[in-house]
Image (cartoon, rainbow, N blue to C red):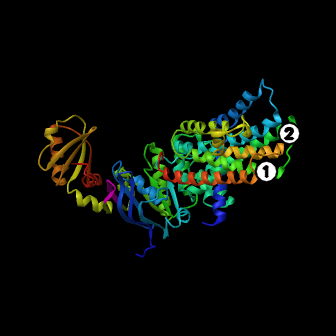
């Protein structure tokens, strides 16, 4: 299979996902409304320094949005009876997975950029390192979109079950990743746990982009995101192939 | 015939799910241009086999060659040669009829112009051109099935796979499905269909393969299978009024069954049986409304081969 055909299949799968799944209620609820309400519940009525809180908010937005699409696609396709037809097309499971990841990544980028521009306009937030910001959004978005696709691997035929499982895994991560409690205030088990969350590395990079400092060296943060991306794609590929026939 | 002269060549296909062997060392060949029926009772392994032949499932053991291409080594290339209508082969209900066909065409690498032309032709021939921009969710089941057919043949595949193609369809959609199978076959497309509808296989297929519990139990032309397994013939007769079963149970009629308003009489000598029925009708002052002779049935062969008849 040549590279142009692989890329074409991935883009076509992503395009199909964008057209079909972006408007689905679980994506809007778990991808948009939840992070917004989380933000409002922490922001309203509190005297929070937005400059300090903003990196965490943007990271949380990218995390929730990019990982919202992936868990939905495979269960929805299996439930609708379209997955078997998709598999019969000249594609492989790996290209389908990467197409799903790409759809999550686009969704994450679009919403995050809107939130970012809103922050710049309404809160006078300044980006100190634009190139690093762009790299972090792309890497973080890919990593979280891959996590979303991995969460669809149990291949339940009921999208609601997978969305519940995905919330069960995604929600705890935002509490251990330096969003609400800064990394420098974490210690012991909390600090160890924070390092097993990919979100931690993105929050740290965003602190560097907005506030000019990071707890870890930037190269460590970038390597962390790349490492988790590779793990998520590899395991998603493995589990999706293993569970392929379940629910067909 | 050479290795590449077959449309499908399956060798030693085996697939297990846990401790259950769904397909057990199955080998068969499908000639180019033929309509090949794959028959078996529910749970015999038909769907698992078709999924292995279409690259959806990977066999635990064995080899599938599609139009000369090894499916395991070149899955994408092999898949470009086939069209598939899965058992629950739904199309995307959130896309329009036109968008579904366009998406499928693009997956097969067709040019935009060709997709446009094929979409117009297919939707017109399937009577859906007026609804081309409507979302498929607004379509009836039969209309959705027509879109499913169009998606499977938009790229003019060399081999068309159909898994229980007429299951649950109304008469009109069933007829359309069968017409499509005939039409693509006339154009040179090999057709591989799984079904448990014996009559459908009997009418459509040049050869049938009967499977049971994951194993092939017979492969032959329907007529040869019928004559090999059923030496008896039957007569279907209906009268203008009710008649007791006992009066029909007379030599050479060996078995009598009532189906609706028709009696089915099994015999090894249809000539004598018909003469007896006519004489009986005259004697009892009854009118014969219909009288049909039926040859040995594929159903009988199927039941014997799959052990369903005891």
Q: Quadrant of residue A67?
A: top right
- Residue B102: in sight, yes or no? no
Q: Is residue A230 above or below residue B66?
A: above
Prevailing SS of the magenta stretch: strand
Q: Secondary structure at mark 2?
A: loop
Numbered tag placed on residue A134 in the rendering: 1
Q: Is residue B218 above or below residue A217?
A: below
x then y, percent, for residue B50: 43, 56
3D distance between C-alphas at marks 1 and 2: 16 Å
The residue singled out by tag 2 in the image is A125
Q: Which mark is residue A57?
A: none
B66 or B173: nearer the eye?
A: B66
Residue at the limit of the structure toward the top, as seen here: A45
Q: Chain letter for mark 2, please.
A: A
Which residues, given as a range, are shown in magenta?
A: B208-216
Q: Residue furthest left?
A: B251
Residue A124, image x, y percentages: 88, 37
* Chain holding disc 1: A
Q: Nearer the viewer, residue A66 or A25?
A: A66
> Is A119 rendered above or below residue B214?
above
Front in this rendered view, residue A237 or B147: A237
Circles 1 and 2 on the same subunit: yes
Residue A27 lies in magenta, yes or no?
no
Kindly identify the residue that appears in the image at 75 percent across and 49 percent down: A136
10 Å neighbourhood of mark 2: few (<14), some, or many (≥20)?
A: some
Q: Quadrant of the N terminus of chain B?
A: bottom left
- Locate residue B127, reporting x and y percent: 57, 47
Q: Would residue B301 appear left or right of A2 to someone viewing this image? A: left
Position of B39 compared to B80: left or right? left
Q: Is residue B210 magenta?
A: yes
How many other residues sit within 10 Å of disc 1, few (<14), some (14-19) or many (≥20)?
some
């Amino acid at each position: 299979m040549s590279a142009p055909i692989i890329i074409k299949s991935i883009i076509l799968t992503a395009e199909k996902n964008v057209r079909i799944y972006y408007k689905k209620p679980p994506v809007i609820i778990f991808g948009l409304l939840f992070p917004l309400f989380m933000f409002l519940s922490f922001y309203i009525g509190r005297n929070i320094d937005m400059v300090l809180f903003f990196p965490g908010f943007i990271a949380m937005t990218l995390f929730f949005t990019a990982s919202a699409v992936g868990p939905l696609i495979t269960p929805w396709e299996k439930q609708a009876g379209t997955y078997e037809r998709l598999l019969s097309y000249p594609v492989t499971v790996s290209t389908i997975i990467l197409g799903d990841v790409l759809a999550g990544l686009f969704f994450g980028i679009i919403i995050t950029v809107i939130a970012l521009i809103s922050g710049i306009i309404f809160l006078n937030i300044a980006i100190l390192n634009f190139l690093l910001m762009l790299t972090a959004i792309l890497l973080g978005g890919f990593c979280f979109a891959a996590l979303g696709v991995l969460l669809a691997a149990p291949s339940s035929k009921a999208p609601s079950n997978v969305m519940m499982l995905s919330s069960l895994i995604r929600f705890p991560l935002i509490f251990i990743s330096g969003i609400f409690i800064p990394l420098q205030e974490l210690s012991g088990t909390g600090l160890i746990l924070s390092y097993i969350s990919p979100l931690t590395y993105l929050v740290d990079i965003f602190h560097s982009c907005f506030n000019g400092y990071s707890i870890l060296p930037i190269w460590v943060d970038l390597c962390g995101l790349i490492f988790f991306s590779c793990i998520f794609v590899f395991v998603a590929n493995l589990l999706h192939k293993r569970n392929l026939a379940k629910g067909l | 015939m050479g290795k590449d002269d077959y449309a499908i060549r399956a060798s030693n296909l085996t697939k297990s799910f846990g401790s259950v062997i769904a397909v057990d060392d199955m080998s068969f060949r499908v000639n180019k241009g033929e309509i090949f029926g794959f028959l078996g009772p529910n749970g015999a392994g038909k769907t698992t086999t078709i999924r292995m032949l279409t690259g959806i499932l990977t066999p635990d053991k064995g080899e599938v060659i599609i139009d000369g291409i090894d499916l395991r080594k070149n899955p994408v290339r092999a898949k470009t040669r086939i069209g598939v209508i899965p058992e629950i082969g739904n199309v995307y209900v959130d896309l329009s009829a036109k968008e579904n066909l366009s998406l499928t065409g693009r997956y097969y690498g067709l040019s935009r112009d060709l997709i446009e032309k094929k979409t117009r032709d297919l939707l017109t021939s399937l009577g859906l051109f007026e609804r081309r921009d409507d979302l498929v969710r607004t379509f009836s089941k039969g209309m959705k099935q027509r879109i499913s057919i169009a998606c499977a043949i938009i790229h003019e595949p060399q081999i068309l796979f159909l898994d229980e193609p007429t299951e649950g369809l109304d008469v009109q959609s069933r007829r359309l499905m069968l017409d499509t199978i005939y039409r693509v076959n006339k154009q040179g497309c090999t057709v591989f269909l799984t079904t448990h509808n014996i009559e459908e296989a009997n009418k459509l297929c040049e050869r049938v393969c009967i499977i049971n519990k994951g194993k092939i139990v017979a492969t032959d032309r329907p007529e040869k299978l019928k004559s090999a397994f059923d030496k008896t013939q039957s007569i279907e007769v209906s009268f203008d009024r009710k008649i007791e079963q006992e009066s029909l149970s007379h030599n050479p009629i060996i078995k009598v069954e009532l189906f609706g308003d028709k009696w089915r009489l099994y015999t090894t000598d249809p000539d004598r049986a018909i003469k007896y029925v006519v004489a009986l009708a005259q004697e009892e002052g009854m009118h014969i409304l219909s009288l049909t002779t039926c040859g040995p049935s594929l159903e009988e062969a199927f039941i014997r081969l799959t052990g369903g008849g005891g």
